[in-house]
Image (spheres, grey):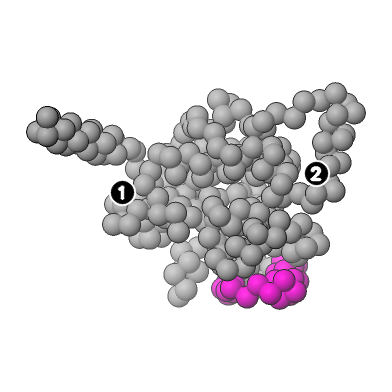
Amino acid sequence: MIRRGLSFALLAGLALAAMAGELATGSLKDVRFSQYGSYSSSAELARRLVTPLNAWRLQRHAAVLGIAIAEQPIDLSKERFALYVPTQMPPDGYALLVFVPPWDEASVPAAWTSILERHGMILVTAAQIGNDSSLLDRREPVSLLGATNVLARYRVNPQRVYVGGFSGGSRVALRLALGYPDLFHGALLEAGSDTLGRTIPLPPQALLEQFRSSSRLVYFTGQRDSANLDADRQSRASLHDWCIDDFDVRAMPWTGHELAEPPIWTGH
């Protein structure tokens, strides 16, 4: 019986290793996911990202109109994602960056792939989540589902899960980082930010404390992008208002409102 048990365990281990080896790497397009999670549920989105008063108003408005609020606002069978998966997984598992763009195309910035490869970081982004899309109904839950499915499919170090965005997508990333500090441990804010407690509602106290103790924000804005540099200054001032001090500012010299290039990522 012992030998059979050992043999079964060995076979199971080999089967899992074979499954892991079959996972695709490199640039992947039109990826379909199927797994839902509690993070993207309508109830959690309202609890974490909306003030209690506005959450009540949304429920009341739906009740008056006779509209049932779906448990999950997104139908994954209709969604498509793009990923970059490094060819070599670090010993402690991949890092993960959920990227929120201002555009609708699901695409991995080509200039970023060498940096993603070097740092063993998966990037996932969804289609049709540009600036014209709804926050609660689309941009935020789809991004959360991207994280949920990558975490289910690949071995990811849970301490190296981040969210980032560019321009309007950066503002979404800040909302998600603040509301989901138990998922995201930092945010890359490129050329877009808002003030906490004013433009962005604060999450419940326990989540705010977790954000304060375990999350890091990195501000990336072009030196010539004056409007967003000013927004960043106001955003950082609001961090001080709430005793949040774990943030960094990276300069992007001779740059306007543009996506960062690899030298900025490496700090050179």
- In the image, 233 versus 9, the foreground residue is 9
The amino acid marked with disc number 1 is Thr
- The magenta-colored residue range is 226-253
> Is residue 46 visible in this depiction of the protein?
yes
* Residue 165 location (% of width, % of height): 60, 55
* Residue 167 location, quadrant: bottom right
Q: Quadrant of the C terminus?
A: bottom left
The disc label shown at residue 239, or none:
none
Residue 55 disc label: 2
Name the residue at 83% across, 42% down.
Answer: 56
The residues tagged by marks 2 and 1 sit, at their Cα atoms, a distance apart of 43 Å
Q: Is residue 231 magenta?
A: yes
Amino acid type for the residue under numbered disc 2:
Ala
Residue under pointer 1: 87
Q: Is residue 66 left or right of residue 86?
A: right
Which residue sits at x=72%, y=71%?
A: 242
Q: Look at the numbered disc 2 and give the secondary structure of its residue.
A: helix
The quadrant where residue 160 appears: bottom left
Q: Please tell me whether residue 156 belongs to the stretch shown in magenta.
A: no
**With respect to residue 46, does 74 lie above or below?**
above
Q: Position of residue 190 (x, y in %)?
A: 61, 62
Mark 2–mark 1 contact, CB under 8 Å? Answer: no
Report x, y in % for residue 78: 58, 26
Q: Is residue 245 left or right of residue 89?
A: right
Crowding near the residue tagged with mark 2, few <14, some 14–19, many ≥20 C-alpha atoms within 10 Å: some
Q: From this viewpoint, which residue is outermost toward the right? A: 64
